[in-house]
Image (cartoon, rainbow, N blue to C red):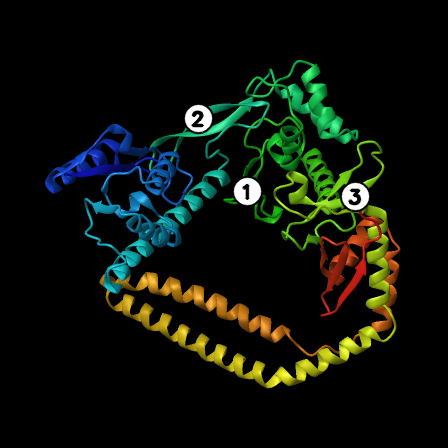
């Protein structure tokens, strides 16, 4: 008797067809298993993820299912409604589907008839094309959703989520062009917490930091939305996007990885709800926040951080301190610092002596008169030797670009002639567009590789020497432009790998 498991999933959002409900999917899979003579052994092997996109691999029960497959604690068959239940990301789909089959688990589809993609090229191709269509569908839907949300934000309404601190959700009714009434979401002032926002901005303009502001608000009795003391990171986000507190609906300020987009890409729609601060104050707070983030992002505490590598394990050296004398600092292997079993390199490198040694090596090896001139001459000779090869490569790339453009034109004409060919050609057009983008990047890179001319080596040497005598930040920037890595061996040797194909060796100035 064959045993079976079921995986069911649906994406968040309204308007799904009835066959995508969890109950419908499980029922379809049970019927399919019954026809196959397979038995669902217990509910522990019915894996369900509700309201999670297939483009997201961080699905709790999906991850639990993969872990059970990996450990061998899994039935013979895995039943799913269709391939899109498992994946909507084309790159992940191809890899993971083959892996599931390789673990001795047969995937059975209710609406498709895909076989083991490892058995034949045709089986592999058919399923990968299906993955590609699913990916195209997902991307089109994402573009459509983003466009609708943009329009909603431009109309002054929220696309959901929690309101900013100091505000409450407020649902309003609006009429569209056809007179239909729709529910929209906006914000209204929260009389209990809005004063905290006003006080926070006043303190920020007075020069107080995020932690001090958070502590002051907590002391006054203000709490976070979860009833906890106010914290620095939450307060600082107020100043990162302050326009929300000036009555503006802000959208598009974050990308899909939750990083901030450039300011010019934000949608900032004014006068959408009551303001706590003025637009002038919002602009002022934003500029202060940008200047502080700039300094913080460029701040470097230790001159050689990120450059020192352990030659034993390959990890970075980190800073450590003498417990008896905190002012005495050392560089040591980060792996070794976490545990003696992780790396055998037990060297402690005195920070001051090592940094002085590296600066001395840079001066002697790179900035000594004649060395840069010799390297510059080698660069010219190398460029001249490779000029013919570059021209030939550029010619091939230009030909490839022309062929790709002709293919897209041909496919577009075919679609215009017969709309029935759209599903067949659209994925190919998307692939060719991606290839064109990559070819253009290659062409641009090769065109930028022009002959090095007009270089004033004396001026460069003078500027570099001045930078190495400047403050820590400028020193760090100068070293990072010259040094690729610094290797530290177990016997106390330091090897400096410069970007100009020169390697210098020296003994460590201090080690225990």
Q: Disc number at residue 330?
A: 3
Q: Is residue 478 left or right of residue 55?
A: right
Q: Position of residue 197 (x, y in %)?
A: 66, 24
Q: Nearer the viewer, residue 183 or 351?
A: 351
- Image vertical order of residue 311 relative to residue 270, above or below: below
- Sequence order check, earlier mark of 2 and 1: 2
- Sequence order check, earlier mark of 3 and 2: 2
Q: Is residue 88 left or right of residue 368?
A: left
Q: Secondary structure at mark 1?
A: loop
Image quadrant where residue 267 sits: top right
The reply to whether residue 35 is visible in this rendering is yes
Which residue corresponds to the image point at 19% horizontal and 52% vertical from the top-left? 113
Which residue corresponds to the image point at 72% horizontal and 37% vertical from the top-left? 284
Q: Position of residue 491 (x, y in %)?
A: 75, 54
**Dot 1 crowding, Cα within 10 Å, few <14, some 14–19, many 20+:** some
Q: Which residue is mark 2?
A: 172
Real-space Cα separation, disc 3 to disc 2, in angstroms: 62 Å
Image quadrant where residue 266 sits: top right
Q: Is residue 395 left or right of residue 326?
A: left
Real-space Cα separation, disc 2 to disc 1, in angstroms: 26 Å
Q: Secondary structure at mark 3?
A: strand
- Image vertical order of residue 45 relative to residue 415, above or below: above
The reply to whether residue 423 is visible in this rendering is no
Real-space Cα separation, disc 3 to disc 1, in angstroms: 39 Å
Q: Position of residue 418 (x, y in %)?
A: 23, 66
Q: Disc number at residue 254?
A: 1
Which residue corresponds to the image point at 42% horizontal and 43% vertical from the top-left? 148
Please tell me whether mark 2 or mark 1 is closer to you in this view: 1
**Dot 2 crowding, Cα within 10 Å, few <14, some 14–19, many 20+:** few
Q: Nearer the viewer, residue 428 or 408?
A: 428
Q: Quadrant of the N terminus?
A: top left
């Amino acid at each position: 008797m064959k045993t079976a498991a079921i995986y069911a999933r649906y994406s968040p959002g309204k308007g799904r067809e009835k066959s995508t409900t969890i109950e419908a999917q499980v029922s379809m899979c049970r019927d399919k298993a019954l026809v196959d003579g397979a038995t669902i052994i217990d509910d522990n092997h019915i894996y369900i993820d509700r309201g999670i996109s297939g483009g997201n691999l961080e699905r709790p029960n999906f991850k639990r299912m993969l872990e059970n497959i990996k450990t061998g604690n899994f039935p013979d068959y895995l039943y799913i409604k269709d391939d899109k239940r498992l994946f909507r990301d084309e790159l992940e789909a191809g890899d993971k589907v083959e892996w599931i089959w390789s673990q001795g688990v047969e995937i059975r589809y209710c609406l498709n008839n895909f076989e083991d993609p490892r058995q034949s090229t045709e089986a592999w191709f058919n399923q990968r094309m299906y993955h590609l269509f699913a990916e195209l569908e997902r991307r089109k839907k994402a573009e459509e959703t983003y466009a609708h949300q943009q329009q909603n934000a431009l109309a002054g309404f929220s696309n959901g989520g929690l309101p900013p601190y100091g505000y409450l959700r407020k649902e309003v009714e609006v009429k569209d062009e056809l007179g239909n009434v729709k529910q929209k979401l906006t914000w209204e002032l929260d009389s209990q917490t809005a004063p905290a926002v006003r006080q926070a901005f006043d303190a920020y303009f007075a020069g107080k930091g995020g932690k001090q502001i958070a502590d002051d608000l907590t002391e006054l009795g203000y709490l976070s939305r979860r009833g906890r003391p106010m914290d620095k990171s939450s307060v600082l986000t107020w100043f990162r996007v302050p326009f929300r507190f000036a009555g503006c609906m802000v959208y598009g300020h974050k990308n899909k990885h939750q990083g901030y987009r450039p300011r010019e890409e934000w949608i900032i729609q004014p006068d959408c709800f009551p303001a706590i601060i003025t637009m002038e104050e919002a602009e002022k707070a934003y500029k202060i926040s940008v200047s502080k983030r700039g300094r913080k992002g460029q701040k470097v505490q230790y001159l050689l951080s990120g450059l020192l590598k352990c030659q034993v394990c390959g990890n970075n050296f980190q800073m450590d301190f003498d417990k008896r004398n905190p002012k005495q600092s050392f560089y040591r292997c980060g792996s070794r610092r976490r545990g003696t079993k992780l790396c055998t390199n037990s060297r402690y490198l005195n920070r001051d002596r090592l940094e002085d040694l590296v600066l001395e090596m840079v001066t002697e090896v790179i900035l000594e008169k004649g060395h840069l001139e010799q390297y510059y001459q080698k660069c010219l000779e190398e460029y001249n030797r490779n000029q013919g090869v570059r021209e030939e490569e550029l010619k091939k790339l230009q030909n490839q670009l022309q062929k790709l453009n002709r293919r897209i034109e041909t496919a577009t004409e075919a679609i215009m002639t017969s709309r029935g060919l759209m599903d067949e050609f659209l994925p190919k057009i998307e692939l060719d567009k991606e290839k064109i983008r990559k070819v253009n990047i290659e062409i641009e890179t090769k065109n930028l590789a022009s002959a090095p001319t007009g270089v004033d080596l004396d001026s460069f040497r003078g500027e570099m020497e001045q930078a190495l005598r400047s403050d820590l930040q400028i020193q760090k920037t100068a070293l990072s432009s010259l040094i690729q890595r610094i290797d530290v061996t177990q016997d106390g040797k330091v090897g400096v790998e410069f970007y100009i194909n020169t390697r210098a060796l020296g003994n460590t100035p201090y080690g225990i």
